[in-house]
Image (cartoon, grey):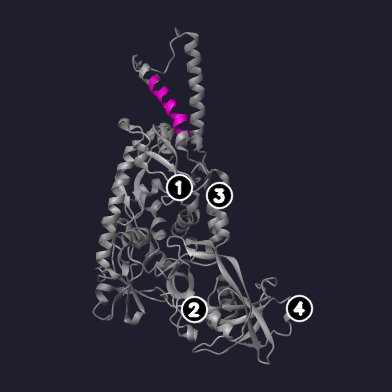
Amino acid sequence: MIDVIARSQRLLGKEVYFPWGVDRNGINIEFTVEKNTKRKMRTYERGEFLDLCASTIETFTQAMRTTAKRVGLSCDFDREYLTDAPDYRSVTQAIFIDLFEQGAIVEDLRPNIYDPVEGTTIADAEVERVTRKTKLVDVRWETNDGTEVVISTTRPEMICACGVVVVHPDDERYRGLVGQTLALPMPTEGRAATVEVRTHPSVKMEFGSGVLMVCSFGDQNDVAVFRELGLDPFQAIDLEGRMTALGGPLAGMTVLEARTSAIEFLESEGKIANVVEKDQEVPVSERGKNPVEIILLKEWYVRQTHMQDRLRTLVDDVEFHPPRNRQFLLDWMDNITIDWPISRRRWYHTEIPVWYAAGGSKVIVPPKGSYVQPWRESPPEGSRVLDRDDRSFLGMWDDMKHDLDDVVGEEKVFDTWMDSSNSNLFVSGLLEDDGRFERCFPTALRPQGKEIVRTWLYYTMLKSALLLDKPAFKHVWIDGLGMDPWGRKMSKSLGNGIDADSVLECGAGGRTGSWRIKGPDGSVALKANKIGSECFRLWKACDAQVGDDFHINPEEIEQKYFGVLTKVFNVARFASQFDVPEDLSTVPASLEPEDRWILAEHHKVMATAREAWTNLDI
């Protein structure tokens, strides 16, 4: 559909800049290399692993180029951009430096969502929720005078990190409990064995006993309560996903092992009043599908909570297609309560362009336009030395390098969306061609799917707002999801996805039945004999309305549109027998009434089409 939009705008006489680009950074290609080689990333030397990622992604990219040309995409393949190329990554690094010096990017020790399996921080937008079976455990606690208090929890292993116990301020049952201390029902190491009971409005009186233990950190509510009450957090889980020494007898166990052991210990001590199995929504990482934890880590953040009002104003200046899909973005913005963590502990991403010196009190940043890898190279000529805390300019690296010792390069990298959210800026010519940037920004159109509104669209809007105080786009075109005929999301694992080569080969050279879709029972339920790229393009333009999820049925596509294309081809072949007049601006008076009627109908159709093209109603 992107190509249909580009072609229609050219027919309207517009100058269309339609570049070809591939997003190649990120954890997905790392996963692919790990799967292909049966080795985890950190068992490699870093440079070796990066080379493997680059060669692997290039194979996929070449296949994408071939397919894009075969289906007839009219984009500019001569101006290809790749998000892992040095010129693209240098723009990402330059934008980081600008935002860092403005104070829009900060480094801080904060609770972060962390994937222990993949060993990296992730953003809230990269978290999914899945339903799993868990145990709700009613644990007996005791006050200093021996009064029993039951607290319900699905995470008894986190008792060691409990900072406070809270009840709702309106809960009459526990008025006499507020202000007392409770003894932790599990042995711990290196902390006080009691916690205070206080009130907090976040407590759900109907959940369990109505008494809540607040730990560092079980969920985002725990983070908020710790912050509001000014509590010092405990570190219960390490970066390997194992319990720290704080857990006492649980130390060294994985979270699941510790949960089982905690229940067994509490049961042996007579501390369990009841255990109920229930369904629970568990947060997992979007890409790894691993349960995530909230861990205190020093990371880099893009400040965003202060920008929401201004961002809403800029969003109002953007035209959405269809208009109702603007709400996808606004709904996500309503949920933003924390800053965007942009640093990751992975490898095949753009490196954070910072070196540390003088015991970490100073940072060194490279000149704009250069792509640097601080983990394996020294600061280049022209780098600047800044104060780490207030970002003030201290001098040039060339002048100060002999006086600065212990220079250490940052090893962390950017979240892949830190790169992807620059695509509109890069193709418009930021830092490369001021004239082109003046003409092309804000970018005319962002076409995309609704499933990445909260990431690609939101982060791109945020980045352009922070850098330029302008909307990123004039138009945003949000399409629905392609579903199989049974309403399932199409995926390789289900065998119901679209393989581009299968569609292109379907019917070519006498080959039939190459595009097949498996039904819910796993058998091939649908297949097409004659489709090809033009038939598929015509179906998408006619049947799939912008913004709506659409069902993809190869047999239906073939039945409805292969015959139509055959008729169009036959009409074109018939018309090609006749000479085309050089001047079509006037209609000869000698035309028969039937000819005039046909031309009049043609003009009506073209007027309707032009109006639709103008409104991006494809």
Q: Say what secondary structure mark 3 lies in.
A: helix
In this picture, is 569 found above or below 165? above
Q: CA distance from mark 1 to mark 4?
A: 56 Å
Disc 2 marks which residue?
258
Amino acid on which the number 1 mark rests in the picture: Gly
Residue 58 falls inside the magenta stretch = no
Looking at this rendering, what residue extends furthest in the bottom direction?
145
- Circle 1 Cα neighbour tier, 10 Å, few/some/many (<14 / 14–19 / ≥20): few
Mark 2 surroundings within 10 Å by alpha-carbon count, few (fewer than 14), some (14 through 19), many (20 or more): many
Q: Position of residue 359 (x, y in %)?
A: 34, 82
Amino acid carrying label 2: it is Ala
Q: Which mark is residue 172?
A: 4
The residues colored magenta run: 556-570
Q: Nearer the viewer, mark 1 or mark 2?
A: 1
Q: Residue at x 52, y 65 (%)?
A: 283
Helix, strand or loop under label 2:
helix
